[in-house]
Amino acid sequence: MPRISPIDPERLDAAQRAVHDAIASGPRKGVRGPLAVWLHRPQLADRAQALGRYCRYDSSLPPRLSELAIMLMGRHWLAEYEWAAHKPFALEAGLSLEVLDAIRDGREPPFTKRDEALIHAFMQQLHERRAIDDALYADLEREIGRDALVDLVGVAGYYTLISMTIKVFEVPPPAGAAPELPTSTN
């Protein structure tokens, strides 16, 4: 059960209404999950959703790599809402079900694309060491370019905020989504 319920749209104050309408009229087509939590603090919601819109829709990362990074963040945080919400997008963007299943299960994914394997290594190293070694940095920069590397860090940061919101406020998965992630880290 969520710790904070979404605000009834009929009870939004002017600041909340402005942010709600901006989110709902954009590519997200609605205010759900962690965004509904942030709406309790409309200035946070406004700034965070703007960053999220950039990370999700406007970054230089191709959707396949962006969705891979999002799925890796969802798995790292065991953020079921994020996993369930983005799995269809990840599949549509070209990630294989075998790769997603391996990530979900905490196994080494069977990557066939070098850029995906490098993104995975980057995210693992970032979480395990809180740093990136020079060799991996150079390989990833050569593979995806400097702009995409900067955007990758932005995606990781934004989806950390998303995942933390999901975990702290116990945001449930979208309606009809069966839980897939373990309840604790492997």
Image (tube, grey):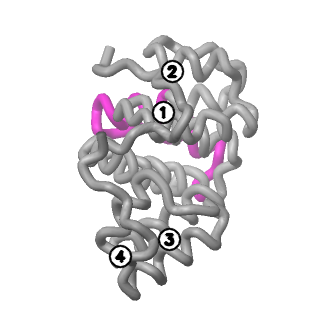
* C-alpha span from label 1 to label 3: 22 Å
N-terminal of the two: label 4 or label 1? 4
Viewer-nearest of discs 3 and 4: 4
Q: Say left or right for 163 vs 89.
A: left
Residue 181 lies, in percent from the top left, at: 43, 22
Q: Secondary structure at mark 2?
A: helix
The residue where tag 1 is placed is 72
Choose top left, top right, bottom left or bottom right for residue 77: top left
Q: Earlier in the sequence, mark 4 or mark 2?
A: 4
Q: Are dots 2 and 1 in contact, CB under 8 Å?
A: yes
Q: Of callouts 3 and 4, which one flags the residue occurring earlier in the amino acid sequence? A: 4
Secondary structure mostly seen in the magenta stretch: helix
The amino acid type, in three-letter code, at marker 1 is Leu
| Secondary structure beneath label 3 | helix
Ranked by sequence position, the earlier of labels 1 and 3 is: 3
Task: Tell me the tag on residue 103.
Answer: 2
Point out residue 163 in the picture as x, y percentages from the top left corner: 37, 44
